[in-house]
Image (cartoon, rainbow, N blue to C red):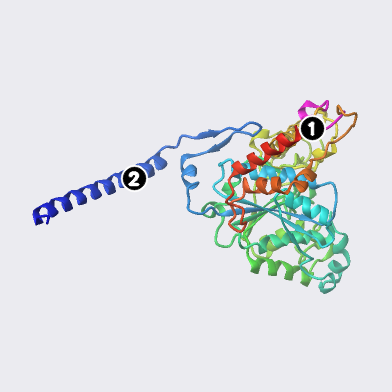
Amino acid sequence: MPSSVGLSRRWLRGRTLFLGMVTLCLTVELYSVWYAANNQKEIQFEKTLSPAIVIKTEDVASLFEEKKKIVAYAISVTKDGAYVDGAAVLAHSAIRVHRYGVSKYGVALIAFVSPAISKKTRTALEACGYRVLERDLPLRIADIQGEYLRNRIEKNGCCGAWELLKLYAWTLTEYHRVVHVDMDVLILQPLDELYDDLKIWGPQVRAVYTYDWTMARPPWGTNPPTQGGFIIAKPDIEVFNSLVDVVRKGDFQGGKGWGGTGVGAYWGGMTIQGLVPYFFEKLRPGSGFAVDECIYNNMATNPRSVGGFDKGECRDGTKPPRKCKDCRLVDVETIKTTHFTICQKPWECRGLSNNCPYCPLCTKLHAKWYDIRKEMEIEWGTFDYSGNAPERHGMCGRHSDGSRGYKPVPIDELVRNSSLARAWRASWQNNKEDPESTTSSHNFQRQRRRRRRTTI
């Protein structure tokens, strides 16, 4: 039987070893905290086809949080059409800035679709990774009390009352933020600074957006419309219900706009373009604000009231006029999201030119779209083009098979190969709602290799 002295010595040795391990762990932890707080050296994250994205050491530390908050990128689909290519490339552009480890947030894709959308379109969106949610109008047109709005909202702007599908972004309370964009938008860099609670989101803020000064009316600098293609919502059911109530009340006074404030007296002003600034800036001041439209949602717009450069007044009211910021002249590498409105849709294969004020920037942005599409198709294992337009990677122009024009994204291949589509989604999804979200990206790579072997 061991003596009491022997047991005491063993106990002391064990305690000493335990305390030594605890001390070592604390030392390592304290050093990590000190290093993150003091090392401000920036790290350049570089990947082929993507702009250099800058992150700091303190941002890297946040990647190891126990559970990532999820940011959803949402689109609204009101009719069938050729826009699905835009939705596919948009999806990949959002995925890549999260999956490559430069954003501390997880990513999800949402497609609100009207009841009229075909099964084919829904299936294509699902193959691209979207969670498809059918939604009807948030209210009946007949229930709008204001006669002026009730009689005109269905023909207002691009999509009439169906533009109100975008309001459902505020209902997705399972997500940290919902970025509602149009399908002709491209995400070029992370937007974490717009998602962080402590930096810009006060207790009242429920929306961040950009203005569309090209649609504004004199006096310049007053009552600008929201650009409906880029809105970040902090989900809140009460906000959604209140927005719908404003439409139901229908206090739109013709040329005087919403509530006689002048907000909304422009194209699309009866729905999102006017409803958002009226609600978040007039009815609830301080609950929403605009960010720099040259960095976020850049559309290569002319900031002045006259065409060309340095002519006319600044639409945003900047004085003197020579100082207003021109989004056509910014460095393309500073743009975080772009919206193909003035630049036209990349999948229309329009001619390349630098002979107009916005053309040089548009050409660069179109090249970004084709770069990201190429990257997406390489990952899918479908990239195989040989057209005569190298800056578009052979996807436009004359092709070796004798065809001409635009080559659509082969989404049908993902639809036909369900296992490949599942592996593709699992390679980037980290939303625990998806039972397959724990699948490693290696499974997707194996699916691609298997597909290539069977097609050779």
Asked whether 202 falls inside the magenta stretch, the response is no
x and y percent of residue 141 in the render? 84, 69
Q: Which residue is mark 2?
A: 30
Mark 2 residue type: Leu
Left of 238 or right of it: where is 77? right
Q: Which residues are magenta?
A: 387-398
Mark 1 residue type: Cys
| Front one among 110 and 244 | 110
Q: Could you tell me if residue 262 is visible in this image? A: no
Viewer-side label of 1, 2: 2
x and y percent of residue 182 in the render? 75, 50
Q: Quadrant for the C terminus, please.
A: top right
Residue 302, above or below 180 = above
**Quadrant assignment, res 159:** bottom right
Crowdedness near tag 1: few (<14), some (14–19) or many (≥20) residues, C-alpha within 10 Å: some
Residue 76, above or below 389 = below
x and y percent of residue 400 in the render? 86, 27
Which label sits on residue 441?
Answer: none
| Front one among 338 and 156 | 338
Q: Residue at x 86, y 68 (%)?
A: 148
Residue 189, above or below 387 = below
Which label sits on residue 359?
Answer: 1
